[in-house]
Amino acid sequence: LRLSLAIAWTAAARSSDVIRLKVGDIVFHPQYVAITWSLSKSDPFRLGKTTGVSLSNPARFVLARMIRGRPRDATLFEGVESRHVNAAMKSVHPSLTAHSIRRGALHHLLRTGASLEAMQEVSRHSTPHALARYLPAAETHVVR
C-alpha cells in the first residue's frame, strides 16, 4: 500500500489509476520509472499515456521485486482497492481521502515552481480548466 501511495504522489495520479496498473505498465530506466497509464478516467479510448516518475531507491527496489517473474498482464497491486487506500489515509488524519494525495502533489508542484503546463502533463488532466479545480484560485487566474 505504501508503494501505491508513493506512485500516486510522484505522478500526481488518481489512486484508482494506480491500483489498476499492470506489471507491463512499468519500465525501469536509470533515472526514472516509466509508467503507462492505460486504464484512466482521462483516457476513455484506452490509448495509454506514459509518464516518467522519480521514485526513491527503496521504492524502486520494492517495485522491482513486485514485478519480477510476474506476467505482464497481472495487476500490480493485487487485492488493493480504493477503500483500502481511503482507510490508510483516514488512519493518518480523518479528513484525508485517497484524492488528497493527488491534490497535495499538485499543490507541492505549484509551490516548487512547476509551470501549469508541466503540471497538466504530469497529472494527465485533459484541460487547463480541469487542473485549475485542484489549485488555489489566486494561482490559476491565467487558466480560468
Image: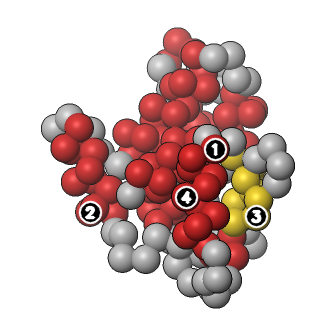
**Left or right relative to 47: residue 97:** left
Measure how far apart labels 4 and 1 are at the Cα level: 9 Å
Residue 57: image tag: 1
**Residue tagged by mark 3?**
27
Q: Which is closer to the viewer, label 4 or label 3?
A: 4
- Pointer 2 or 1: first along the chain: 1
**Is the residue 133 above or below the residue 138 in the image?**
below
| Relative image position of residue 36 (x, y in whole percent) | 71, 64
**Residue tagged by mark 4?**
62
Q: Secondary structure at mark 3?
A: strand
Q: Secondary structure at mark 1?
A: helix
Q: Are the residues flagged by discs 4 and 1 in contact, CB closer than 8 Å?
A: no
- The residue at 75%/72% (across/down) is 47
| Relative image position of residue 62 (x, y in whole percent) | 55, 58
Amino acid found under the numbered disc labelled 2: Arg
**Residue tagged by mark 2?**
83
Q: Nearer the viewer, residue 76 or 124?
A: 76
